[in-house]
Image: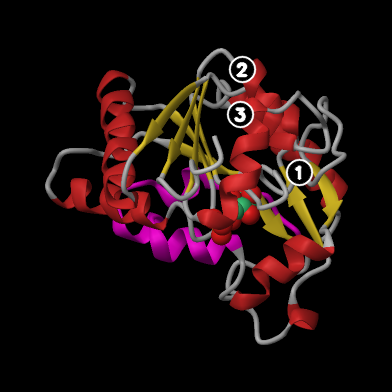
Amino acid sequence: MKIIIDSPEKIAAIAAERYVTLLNKKPNAVLGLATGSTPLGLYAKLAELYNEKKISFDKVTSFNLDEYVGLDGNHDQSYRYFMNTNLFDKVNIRKNATFVPSGLGDVDANAKNYEEMIAAAGGIDLQLLGLGQNGHIGFNEPGTPLDSLTHKIELTANTREANARFFASLSDVPTHAISMGIKTVMNAKSIILIALGENKADAVAKSVNGKIDTMVPASVLQLHPDVTFYLDEAAASKL
Ligand code: F6R
């Protein structure tokens, strides 16, 4: 596991360079993408690099980590909407090659189908992760089995409260999500985790230095051969 500590601005720039390098080498790479506040700086940087003609997404396929159950892609808190507005609409990615798991209809069938689509695309080359305050990755809450594939999950009170800031009230936050599993994430060839801010410091310390424990899902990343944590000073303060 590699660890890079810098300012949030530099982290966005350094992480963006990973994409420039990857897409130069493999223009049709398969990207695993994340939502939340953490990747916003990176996505802004990628859009900037695209405008400067330093990166092209025209052959990229992408798979997002997760989506809320019950929200369609036009809902402004759906992760599909987030991805369209914060990245996909700003670069030259083919919209029909961007996939976000669907939380509508038969979610279990959607989950199985999602795994098959990832496999058919050749697997994920570079998976981006944020980190929950409770150590979750994707929506894999503490206790999620290490061999989990894409599945429906009940969100913890902690996660719903953390995400309530994006909704009118806590009761509007969906109770369930569909998420890539821990095994899906671990199957990616390379992994980038970005964590910013003091409120991530405990989870970072447990994930990096703690024992591998399903109660801290990100701790399993210690077992991956190619994972880099990009941290600001605050998130790294308990290492
Ligand atoms: C989002 C996701 C979540 C977030 C995590 C951190 O697709 O999978 O695991 O990465 O909840 O969220 P922020 O970045 O808002 O602190």
x then y, percent, for residue 156: 83, 59
For marks 1 and 2, give the CA distance. Answer: 17 Å
Compare marks 1 and 2 and give the one earlier in the sequence: 1
Mark 1 and ligand 1: say if the CB distance to the nearest ligand atom is below 8 Å.
yes
Q: Nearer the viewer, mark 3 or mark 2?
A: 3
The amino acid on which the numbered mark 1 sits, given as a three-letter code, is Asn
Q: Are marks 1 and 3 in contact (CB under 8 Å)?
A: no
The numbered mark, 3 or 2, whose residue comes first in the sequence reads 3
CB of mark 2 near ligand 1 (< 8 Å): no
**Taking the image as drawn, is residue 100 in sight?**
no
The residue most toward the bottom is 168
Instruction: Estimate how packed mark 2 is, as few (under 14), some (14 to 19) or many (20 or more) residues with alpha carbons within 10 Å.
Output: some
**Numbered circles on residues, count:** 3
Q: Residue at x 68, y 56 (%)?
A: 67
Determine which residue is flagged by label 1. Answer: 140
Q: Which residues are magenta?
A: 79-103
Residue for badge 3: 208
